[in-house]
Image (cartoon, grey):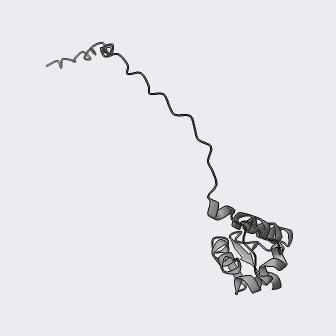
C-alpha cells in the first residue's frame, strides 16, 4: 500500500484594515504652561542656631539655602561615607547639629528643622 502525501495548505491573503470612517476629533488647545512659583514657606529666611551658624553662617537664609550650604560643607570636608554615599559622617561641628556620629542624607532636612527659627 502506498501512503498518500498531503499537499501543504495554502494561506489566505492577509486582509487590509478598512480605512477609518470617523473624522479625527480636533485636539483641544493646551493652556499655556504656568511658570512654577516657589512655596513661600521654603523661601522665608530663617535664623540658624549657634551650632548651625558655625557651618552655614549666621545670616538668615531660606531653608533650601541652608541645606545647600550644608551639602557644600559636607563635600568640601569629604564627609560622605566612602562605601555608602547616602551616609554622612559627622565631624565635631556637624555632631552638634545631628546629635549622632552618622546620619543618612534623608534625615538631613528634618535634623536642620530643629536648628532654625
Q: Where is residue 85 in the image (x, y as percent from the top left)?
A: 71, 69
Q: Is residue 90 above or below residue 9?
A: below
Pick whichever, 48 or 19, lies toward us.
48
Quarter of the view holding residue 26: top left
Q: Position of residue 13 (x, y in %)?
A: 30, 12
Pick whichever, 28 or 40, lies toward us.
40
Q: Is residue 108 left or right of residue 76?
A: left
Quarter of the view holding residue 15: top left
- Residue in the picture at 62% in, 43% down: 35
Q: Is residue 117 left or right of residue 25?
A: right
The number of callouts visible is: 0
- Residue in the picture at 82% in, 85% down: 92
- Residue in the picture at 17% in, 18% down: 2
Q: Where is residue 30 in the image (x, y as percent from the top left)?
A: 50, 32
Whether residue 91 is visible, yes or no, is no
Q: Position of residue 51 (x, y in %)?
A: 79, 83
Whether residue 43 is visible, yes or no, is yes
Name, please, the residue furthest toward the right. 76
Quarter holding the C terminus is bottom right
Quarter holding the N terminus is top left
Q: Is residue 76 left or right of residue 97?
A: right
- Residue in the picture at 80% in, 74% down: 79
Q: Is residue 17 left or right of residue 76?
A: left
Quarter of the view holding residue 82: bottom right
Amino acid at each position: 500500500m502506498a501512503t498518500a502525501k498531503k499537499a501543504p495548505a495554502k494561506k489566505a491573503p492577509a486582509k487590509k484594515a478598512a480605512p477609518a470612517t470617523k473624522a479625527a476629533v480636533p485636539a483641544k488647545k493646551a493652556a499655556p504652561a504656568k511658570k512654577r512659583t516657589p512655596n513661600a514657606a521654603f523661601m522665608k529666611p530663617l535664623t540658624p542656631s549657634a551650632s548651625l551658624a558655625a557651618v552655614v553662617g549666621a545670616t538668615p537664609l531660606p531653608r533650601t539655602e541652608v541645606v545647600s550650604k550644608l551639602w557644600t560643607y559636607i563635600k568640601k570636608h569629604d564627609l560622605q561615607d566612602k562605601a555608602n554615599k547616602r551616609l554622612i559622617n559627622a565631624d565635631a561641628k556637624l555632631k552638634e547639629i545631628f546629635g549622632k556620629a552618622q546620619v543618612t542624607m534623608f534625615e538631613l532636612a528634618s535634623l536642620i528643622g530643629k536648628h532654625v527659627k
